[in-house]
């Protein structure tokens, strides 16, 4: 995605991180992911420059 699309989807980095965290937690809850993988993805999202 371009910057404009990312900004439309995630107005702030906090919004992005909240959504990543929520979705990864849901994947763990449903048994698709293990907690350590979810935590790694959330750490990567926190360190990213999205949006």
Image (cartoon, grey):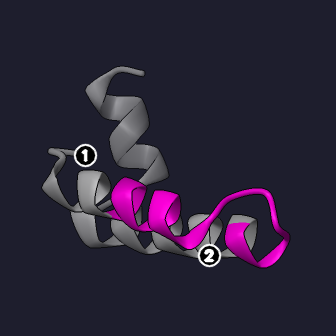
**Residue at (22, 62) in percent of width and height:** 46
**Residue at (42, 21) in percent of width and height:** 1
Residue 35 is tagged as none
Q: Is residue 25 highlighted in magenta? A: no
Q: Nearer the viewer, mark 1 or mark 2?
A: 2
- Local secondary structure at mark 2: helix
Mark 2 neighbour class, 10 Å CA radius: few under 14, some 14 to 19, many 20 or more: some
Is residue 20 rendered to the left or right of residue 46?
A: right
Q: Of residues 11 and 16, which is closer to you in this image?
A: 16
Q: Is residue 40 highlighted in magenta? A: yes
Mark 1 and mark 2 in contact? Answer it, CB < 8 Å: no
Q: Is residue 10 above or below residue 35?
A: above
Outermost residue to the right? 30
Residue range highlighted in magenta: 28-42
| Residue 29, x across and y down, in percent | 77, 78
Is residue 49 rendered to the left or right of residue 5?
A: left
Q: How many marks?
A: 2
Is residue 31 rendered to the left or right of residue 1?
A: right
- Local secondary structure at mark 1: loop
**Residue at (27, 29) in percent of width and height:** 3
Q: Earlier in the sequence, mark 1 or mark 2?
A: 2
What is the chief secondary structure element of the magenta stretch? helix
| Residue 14, x across and y down, in percent | 28, 72
| Residue 40, x across and y down, in percent | 36, 58
Measured Cα–Cα span from mark 1 to mark 2: 19 Å
The residue labelled by disc 2 is 25
Mark 1 neighbour class, 10 Å CA radius: few under 14, some 14 to 19, many 20 or more: some
**Residue at (48, 49) in percent of width and height:** 9
The residue labelled by disc 1 is 50
């Amino acid at each position: 995605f371009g910057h404009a699309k990312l900004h439309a989807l995630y107005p702030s980095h906090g919004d992005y991180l909240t959504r990543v965290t929520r979705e990864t937690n849901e994947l763990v809850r449903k048994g698709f992911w293990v907690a350590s993988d979810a935590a790694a993805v959330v750490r990567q999202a926190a360190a990213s420059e999205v949006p």
